[in-house]
Image (tube, rainbow, N blue to C red):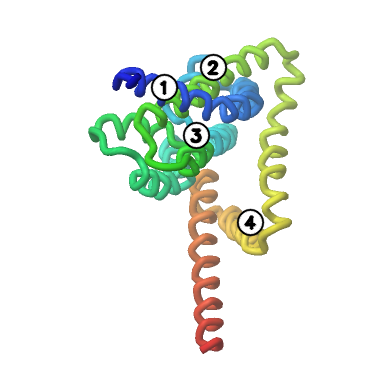
Amino acid sequence: MELSTENVYDSSFREGIKGGVSIAIGYLPIALTFGLLAKTTGLSFLDTVMMSLVVFAGASQYIALSLIALGSGIFEIIFTTFIVNIRHLLMSASLNEKVEDDSLLKKAVYAFGITDETFSVAATKEGTVSTRYIFGVTSISYASWVVNSGIGFLIGANLPQTLQEGMTVALYAMFVGLLVPSLKTSRKVLFLASFSAVIHSILAVLSILSTGWRIVAATLLASVVVEAIEYVIKGKGNRNGE
């Protein structure tokens, strides 16, 4: 018995939902923490949920909270978010070679839901990836992130005020926790983090730029210098190997 086109589409969407369940579960504690920290940073419930609805990028949202806590301006936050998320352009371009042909509008819609995790699930799926499948993966992941961000905020709102104020330290502890594992496995990351810190400190001592722009400038400059040094070293290595 042949399946109708509609049944095939429904099956693809359900398969995508199943593929995204593990992502949704993984997002739960991260989104809860984001919501809680958003409350302690001073955002309202609407601000918190809208940020997750519109941005949907964990690392960028955490960085935005840090910049908000430092009193950075809106353009600094937007530009930093753009730099952090620029890798999504590469992921989307790569995934475009694997997905089925479809309208530009549909691709634009599900491209919004592409994160490191949803990209990994879609990219490792065998064969051509259908539009319905990607919508399934991104829908459940997106719902988990947004809903649990709101729940995290509500949990934070019920904490004692003293504890809420103390939780702002957790934001920086989280960044350290994310950085340490990478430092253990990559000297490049260690050099990049150290060089960025040095540049930021110099800019701060000289009172050059505001706090937010110092972070952006230090990150960009350190990235360019580290990549240039790596390129030169690899070039010398290739010439010596000839």
Query: What residue did someone put label 2 on?
Result: 147
First in sequence: mark 1 vs mark 2: 1
Q: Is residue 224 above or below residue 235?
A: above
Marks 4 and 1: which is nearer the front?
1
Return the x and y of residue 39 as percentages of the image width and height: 61, 20
Q: Residue furthest top?
A: 158
First in sequence: mark 4 vs mark 3: 3
Q: Secondary structure at mark 1?
A: helix
Q: Quadrant of residue 139?
A: top left
First in sequence: mark 3 vs mark 2: 3
Query: What residue did someone put label 4 on?
Result: 193
Residues at marks 1 and 2, CA–CA distance in whole angstroms: 25 Å
Marks 4 and 3: which is nearer the front?
3
Q: Is residue 202 above or below residue 233?
A: above
Residue 56 as seen in the image, left or right of residue 24: left
Q: Quadrant of residue 53?
A: top left
Camera-side residue of 18 and 114: 18
Return the x and y of residue 134 as percentages of the image width and height: 41, 31
Q: Secondary structure at mark 3?
A: loop
